[in-house]
Amino acid sequence: MTSSPSIGFLAPLFVPATRPDRYFKAAGSGADGVIIDLEDAVAANEKDAARATLVAASLPPNSIVRVNAFGTRWHEADIVAMKGLGIAGIMLPKAETAGHLESVRAVLGDLPVISLIESAHGVAGVREVARHSDRLAFGYIDFSADVGCSMDHDALLMARSEIVLASRLAQLPSPLEGVTPSFDDPALVEDDARYAAMMGFGGKLCIHPKQIAPTLKGFRPSQKDIEWAIRISNSGDGAVSVDGMMVDAPVRLRAQRILAAAKASDAAGG
């Protein structure tokens, strides 16, 4: 799929669909996107009312709606309700097959879709899912529960690597990392964001406004790396020596990506 710049988020913030009073507060929190949630944030007996509330409300620019998963009794009604809302896209939880995406496309056409990979089947089929998506995201808490592993970095290394690789193979934007459950520990959020950036992720989902600043900080390259990237970018063409290091095209590409990451973080408010 051709990716849309409207879903190029770095630190999008979830807000429950049941709280329309918070939609614009979320948009003004420093987040560069708002994900209005019909899924995990809404109790089963409130799903239909939450959908009706969302459809009737004014929505911030660049709103994404996380619908309920394929196969749930709310999914089809959620998808139909998204038509004509003027949203930037939807987030599809527990995406596992191309068929899940095709059923959405049949109703919503080219509306961008962020596929949330949250299960063993999702990771196993992620390359196929990526080819039918506009961006991927990793729901590592659900994934850990599904496979019975811990949420330590080592335990999730394979899944994260596969999601990053699938995104690159499908020429998608770098994927979104999952949420950090704690929102009162900015150092932890920043560390999680920095690790995600190191792995090749291009943003991180947030569940509280307190997480936005440390997320942006974690994704911003260090000043030392930025200064290095500037020197490399100014080194001309061909193979040359910079700071005692041989510089050629792959090194310049890394420098360009560092500068692009810094620019994206600055534009998002980091």
Image (cartoon, rainbow, N blue to C red):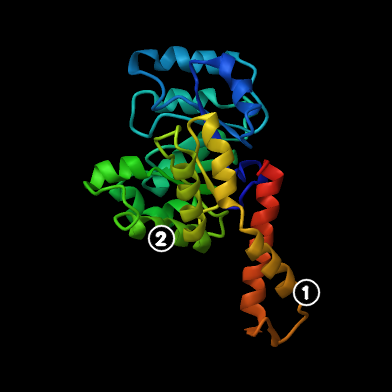
Query: Is the C-beta separation of discs 2 and 1 under 8 Å?
Result: no
In terms of sequence position, does the residue under pointer 2 or pointer 1 come before the other?
2
Work out whether 102 lies above or below 61: below
Percent position of residue 42, x then y: 40, 20
Instruction: Identify residue for label 2.
Output: 161
Numbered disc in front, either 2 or 1: 1
Element at label 1: loop
**Which residue sits at x=71%, y=45%?**
267
In this rendering, position of residue 263 left or right of residue 68: right
**Which residue sits at x=50%, y=20%?**
17
Quarter holding the C terminus?
top right
Is residue 216 at least partly visible in the picture?
A: yes
Residues at marks 2 and 1, CA–CA distance in whole angstroms: 31 Å
Percent position of residue 22, x then y: 57, 18
Q: Nearer the viewer, residue 16 or 59?
A: 16
In this rendering, position of residue 12 left or right of residue 125: right
Element at label 2: helix
| Residue 127: quarter of image | bottom left
Percent position of residue 104, x then y: 48, 37
| Residue 234, disc | 1
**Which residue sits at x=64%, y=64%?**
224
Query: What's under tag 1, amino acid-wise?
Result: Asn
**Which residue sits at x=36%, y=46%?**
96
Query: What's under tag 2, amino acid-wise?
Result: Ser
Counting every numbered tag in the picture gives 2
| Residue 23, disc | none
Work out whether 6 lies above or below 25: below
Work out whether 240 lies above or below 180: below
Work out whether 116 lies above or below 76: below
